[in-house]
Amino acid sequence: MRELALDEWRRLDRDHLWHPYTQMKTAPPPVPVVRGEGVYLYTAEGQRILDGISSWWVNIHGHSHPYLNEALARQAGRLEHVMFAGFTHQPAVDLAERLVRILPAGLERIFYSDNGSTAVEVALKLAMQFWRNRGDGKRRKFVVLDHAYHGDTVGAMSASADSAFTEPFRPMLFPVARAHAPYCYRCPVGLDPASCRIDCLDSLRRILSVEGDSIAGVLVEPMLQAAGGMIVWPAEFLRQVRRLCDQAGALMIADEVLTGFGRTGRMFACEHAGVSPDLICLSKALTGGYLPMSATAATAEIYEAFLSEDRSKTFFHGHSFTANPLACAVSIASLELFEREGSLSRVRTLESLFQARASSLRALECVGEVRILGGMIALELVRDRKSRDAGGYLDRAGPALTRLFLERGLLLRPLGNILYFMPPYVISDAQAHWALDQIEEVLRGWRWPEP
Ligand code: PLP
């Protein structure tokens, strides 16, 4: 690969590239990154930036970790890729066995794909065909939650909440039933924490009691609805979702694309409620944030519905790069790092550090609520604390704040009015305090941009 001078790099980027989510004519040019180490990214202009969002929530052990680098190089020297239909390799087998060992009980079969959206697509398709293969073709509808985000492919968008992300594509999307999510700060049934008995669950209960026998599955982001606003759940809501699915005979599908691999302080978020879903979707931190790969894990019961001499019962879904050996090898090394570096206990320490800083953040005039779960702290910013008025996702506050933090060497990318900090687990206490200091300083006296 040639080394490009910065001017040339910028020109080629401007003339030939199409970056995600950033086509505003007035948007600043993309930040040219040349190197990563630990929690830091280094730019071609010599700036050091603390990666406060784990590069879209994927990086957990830090950038360019020597242990992961070595695992990748070792595997590249042996086998870079082979198709996975009718072939197998040791990294895929080893990873599957390790995943089954740590996943919630009963999830025994691993189906690999390429990213979080396809992990969800696979889960939806598996659920649909499971019922068909079992001769129950009536179960063909999914229930999803308000504020959900499951990805950008067509099935994942259909299952996500209506938003600026899905609006242009509405005619392509399939219908789903939508139930309330436990968004306590903006309670969908108008209660406050003192009087709450998880009454918001009634809408899911109602859907399942009226049309339960036509429901293929209920899809949720357990404990933390991420892109929809970093909404942290009471564990009881999740426990009740499992119970309602059992009563209705519907599959419970957990999208742990973000929450999987320790982010919430447990290896998987379902552990907070002690539940096992029937299908689970994993990606992002699966590879330690190194390569695009995902896995959908299913129960033996689901897998067995596909085992047949009748080929029409086969799951006809596969990607060219299914079970890529490089991605499997680096995922195995990432799981090993959990043991070697005590990653889970580091997340819990981070959660305590966030808790200790919460009250001073809560005191800031523009902060409506502070939400913390594991290695994630989110501030819901409001124009007015009483009315809780706040702009939506497209509000100018987000990009304006991103710029202010970047000037200080901190990468944050608010989701509309939700400013969150979700660093790699290896961040030191001093680095985390520094980042939270920046947040406090910027928000103190901060004014919303005019609409
Ligand atoms: N599911 C959840 C919960 C996510 O947070 C995301 C991405 O942010 C996805 C699915 C989609 O993953 P990807 O961007 O890898 O397609």
Image (spheres, helix red, strand yellow):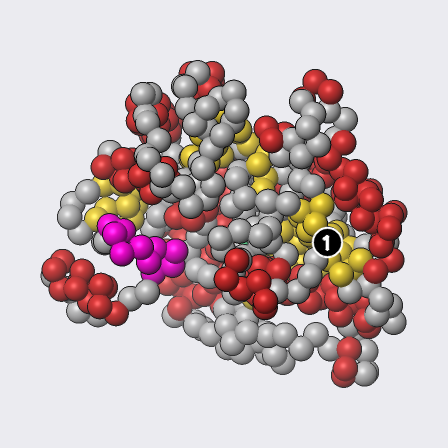
Q: Position of residue 316 (x, y in %)?
A: 67, 77
Q: Quadrant of the N terminus?
A: bottom left
Residue at position x 33%, y 58% in the image: 23
Q: Is residue 131 above or below residue 144?
A: below
Residue at position x 46%, y 44% in the image: 393
Q: Is residue 91 above or below residue 47?
A: below
Q: Position of residue 334 (x, y in %)?
A: 48, 50
Residue placed most toward the observer, 57 or 381: 381
Q: Position of residue 237 (x, y in %)?
A: 72, 36
Q: Is residue 106 above or below residue 141?
A: above
Q: Quadrant of residue 395?
A: top left
Give left or right: position of 211 versus 447: right
In terms of secondary structure, where does tag 1 sit? strand
Give the labeled residue for mark 1.
Answer: 177
Q: Work out whether residue 159 can be spotted.
A: yes
The magenta segment: 19-28
